[in-house]
Every structure is written in structure tokens, then in C-alpha cells.
């Protein structure tokens, strides 16, 4: 983006914006090309990684993810929720089986996608019309109908976990449970991913129960650290 476009987007005076951009370029947080267009620099990636690594949640959740991954032989993730906008993976534990989900710490996804998306919708205070509008803009490999998806969101409220049986990624089952704050708002989720053939209904229910126990312990730990 050029200086004018950045200044307009930030509602800043162009000269002030240019001064700030030059400082950021000097710090390698922003880079500029020969046409005077600006983009994020490599140091921004290092800064973002540092922020994630120093997150209280990331350090607190890692032992739980390792236990889940080892016990159930799945990929386990700790995910932070940013309203209805995005979710971001803050911690990750891979199992020792050949299956690997192509996701890294720092990966960002639309908030309402997959199993975590059902949890977000279940606990959101946003009007259903807004949730439905965002849902219809999502991209799935096998998209559920809005009717079925809403029933699955209601299931989260009753059972305390969400299941994506190959809708987001064909052949992959994902299970998510909420991590709640003291006001019972969902701030994070614990998520597991595994090959559908290895995660039948009974196993998913048992695993979800273990994940809920880990989520409750994690919530208490995070509250104690405040």
C-alpha cells in the first residue's frame, strides 16, 4: 500500500503517517519497494512469534495439549478467539502417528469455521442474523447447511463440545471444547484433529469428556494467574 492509502485507512495526516512508516522501515517491521509501496517486514513475524510464545495461555495450555495428543494420538491445539472475526492457533502438540495436520502456531482462520466456529457461535451474544451472514461467507470442503449447522451449534450449548465430521477438511474429524473466563465467556478452545476412520462417535465422546476436564483445569489456572 502507498502512504496515502495507509493514511486514509488509519485516518492520519499523510506526513505523520510517512514519518511513522520510516521509523518502522528502520526497525525492519515494515519494508518499502522501489514504487514506494509498503508491506510488513520480516521482523514483524519475529515480533508476532515472540508475543505468542510469551502468552500466558500458550504456556499454560501446552501440558494439557501434550497429554491429549499422547493419550488419544491426535493433533491437539490451543486456539484464541477474537470475537466473530478470527481465531488463531497459539499452541500445538503433534502426535507420533504418521498423520500431520498442516497448521502452525500463529495460523489464523475465520472465527466461525470448523469445530471451534460452532463453539464461538454457541457462546456469542451477537444476533443470529450476523452469525448467519458470516457463516454463509465461509469456505468448507463439504459445507453443512445452515439448518444442520445451527442444530450443531445448539448441541454445543447442551453437551459442551463441538464436532466437525469432515465438513471443514474432508476425511478429518475435529473436536473442540470451550475454555471459559469467570463470566462464562469463551476466550479460547482446545481442539483436536484426527483421521475420521480413527475417531468414531464413541471415541469422540470419550475424548471430548477428557478435553472438557482439561479445559476446566486450564480455566482455573488462568484465573489464578490474573
Image: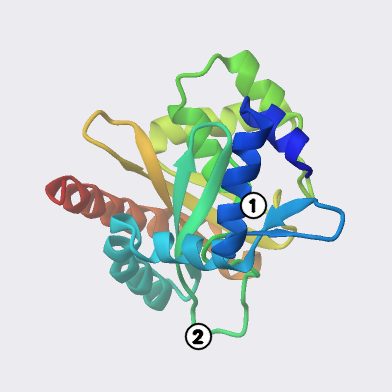
Nearer to me, 184 or 7: 7
Q: Position of residue 155 (x, y in %)?
A: 49, 33
Instruction: Tell me if I can see residue 26 in this picture.
Output: yes
Please state the horizontal and vertical placement of residue 165, each as a whole percent of the image.
64, 52
Pointer 2: residues within 10 angstroms few (<14), some, or many (20+)? few
The quadrant in which the N terminus is found is top right
Choose mark 2 or mark 1, whichever is in front: 2
- Residue in view at x 61 percent, y 66 percent: 103
Single out the residue that lies furthest toward the left: 224
Residue 217 position (above or below residue 158): below
Quarter of the picture holding the C terminus: top left
Identify the secondary structure beneath mark 2: loop
- Taking depth in this image into account, of 8 and 189 the one nearest to the observer is 8
Q: Secondary structure at mark 1?
A: strand
**215 relative to 4, above or below:** below
Colour pattern = rainbow
Q: Which residue is mark 1?
A: 165
In the depicted view, which residue is nearer to us: 192 or 80?
A: 80
Question: Can residue 112 be spotted in the picture?
Answer: no
Residue 16 image offset from top left, x and y in percent: 59, 36
**Pointer 1 local density, CA inside 10 Å: few below 14, some 14–19, many at least 20:** many
Q: Residue at x 44, y 48 (%)?
A: 80
Question: Relative to 183, is 195 above or below?
Answer: below
Residue 179 falls left or right of residue 123 = left
178 and 88: which is toward the camera: 88
Residue at position x 75%, y 31% in the image: 145
Residue wearing tag 2: 96
Q: CA distance from mark 2 to mark 1?
A: 22 Å
Q: Quadrant of residue 173?
A: bottom right
Residue at horizontal 62 percent and vertical 70 percent from the top: 101
Amino acid at each position: 500500500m502507498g502512504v496515502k492509502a495507509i493514511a486514509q485507512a488509519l485516518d492520519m495526516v499523510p506526513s505523520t503517517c510517512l514519518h511513522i512508516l520510516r521509523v518502522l522501515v528502520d526497525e525492519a517491521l515494515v519494508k518499502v519497494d522501489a514504487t514506494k509501496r509498503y508491506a510488513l517486514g520480516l521482523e514483524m513475524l519475529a515480533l508476532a512469534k515472540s508475543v505468542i510464545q510469551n502468552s500466558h495461555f500458550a504456556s499454560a495450555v501446552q501440558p494439557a495439549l501434550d497429554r491429549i495428543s499422547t493419550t488419544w494420538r491426535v493433533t491437539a491445539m490451543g486456539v484464541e478467539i477474537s470475537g466473530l472475526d478470527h481465531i488463531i492457533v497459539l499452541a500445538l502438540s503433534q502426535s507420533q502417528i504418521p498423520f500431520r495436520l498442516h497448521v502452525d502456531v500463529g495460523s489464523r482462520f475465520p472465527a466461525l469455521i470448523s469445530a471451534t466456529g460452532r463453539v464461538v457461535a454457541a457462546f456469542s451474544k451477537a444476533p443470529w442474523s450476523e452469525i448467519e451472514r458470516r457463516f454463509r461467507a465461509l469456505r468448507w470442503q463439504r459445507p453443512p447447511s445452515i439448518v444442520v449447522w445451527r442444530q450443531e451449534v445448539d448441541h454445543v450449548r447442551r453437551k459442551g463440545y463441538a464436532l466437525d465430521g469432515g465438513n471443514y477438511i474432508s476425511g478429518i474429524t475435529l473436536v473442540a471444547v470451550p475454555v471459559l473466563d469467570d463470566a462464562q465467556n469463551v476466550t479460547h478452545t482446545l481442539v483436536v484433529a484426527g483421521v475420521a476412520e480413527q475417531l468414531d462417535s464413541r471415541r469422540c465422546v470419550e475424548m471430548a469428556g477428557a478435553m472438557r476436564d482439561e479445559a476446566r483445569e486450564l480455566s482455573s489456572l488462568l484465573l489464578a494467574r490474573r
